[in-house]
Image (cartoon, rainbow, N blue to C red):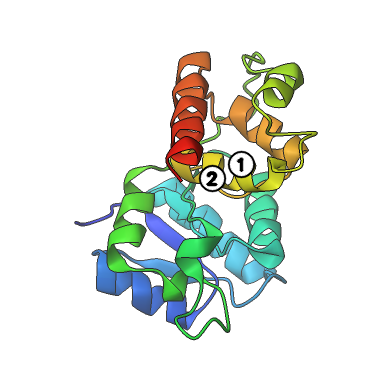
Amino acid sequence: MNIKEIIVVEGKDDTTAIKRAVGADTIETNGSAISEETLRRIEHAQKKRGVIVFTDPDYPGRRIRAIIEERIPGVKHAFLAKEKTIAKNGRGLGIEHASDEDIRHALLHVYTINAGEHFEEQITLEDLMLARLIGHPQSKERRNKLGEILNIGMTNGKQLHKRLIMFQITVEQFGAAVAQLNQEEQDA
């Protein structure tokens, strides 16, 4: 599997994991304090080949994603669930610990946010409450599983609502994902 876009990752180990899983070029941010030079390289890459932001599912990864998204409109996003990025010894978290199969799956299910475009809210906060994704004792676990099913990453309640709108998740896609989530809970 070869990826045309340049994948933005956090470090060398992430690059190694990406290149092990797919044919792709990467740009490393080397931490959450992205330099101006790195942002210019990402901007150039976006103009030439497109960019996929593929950062760790933690605070620094979300911060890098937000900085890039604000500066460079139209980048694509790939997400992996936190559980799929935990080191085998349990110490550490990151794309570098993910399996090749999980990396390929994430890269096949990327999302693009069209900058400046306004999207209508299809799924309301009330829908999230009814689906027990906010305001419920198991909301956090349910959001994490839903994020994995929809390939939109881990979120809090507010971020989930925002991502559902940004990534134009339809009522049908949302309903199917919630049904799958409910079925998995019943089967457990």
The secondary element bearing badge 2 is classed as helix
Q: Which mark is residue 63?
A: none
Q: How many numbered callouts?
A: 2
Residue 66 vs 164, above or below: the answer is below
Q: Which mark is residue 145?
A: 2
- Residue at image location 39% in from the left, 58% down from the top: 6
Mark 2 touching mark 1, by CB under 8 A? yes
Residue 174 visible in rendering: yes
The secondary element bearing badge 1 is classed as helix
Q: Position of residue 52 (x, y in %)?
A: 45, 52
Residue 36 vs 119, above or below: the answer is below
The residue that disc 1 covers is 142
Q: Is residue 18 left or right of residue 90?
A: left
Most extreme residue toward the right is 135
Q: Position of residue 50 (x, y in %)?
A: 41, 48
Q: Position of residue 179 (x, y in %)?
A: 47, 25
* Structural crowding at the residue carrying mark 1, measured as other residues with C-alpha within 10 Å and reported as few (<14), some (14–19) or many (≥20): many
Q: Position of residue 78 (x, y in %)?
A: 46, 50
* Structural crowding at the residue carrying mark 2, measured as other residues with C-alpha within 10 Å and reported as few (<14), some (14–19) or many (≥20): many
- Residue at image location 68% in from the left, 34% down from the top: 133
- Residue at image location 53% in from the left, 15% down from the top: 171
- What is the three-letter code of the residue carrying label 1? Arg
- Residue at image location 27% in from the left, 67% down from the top: 21
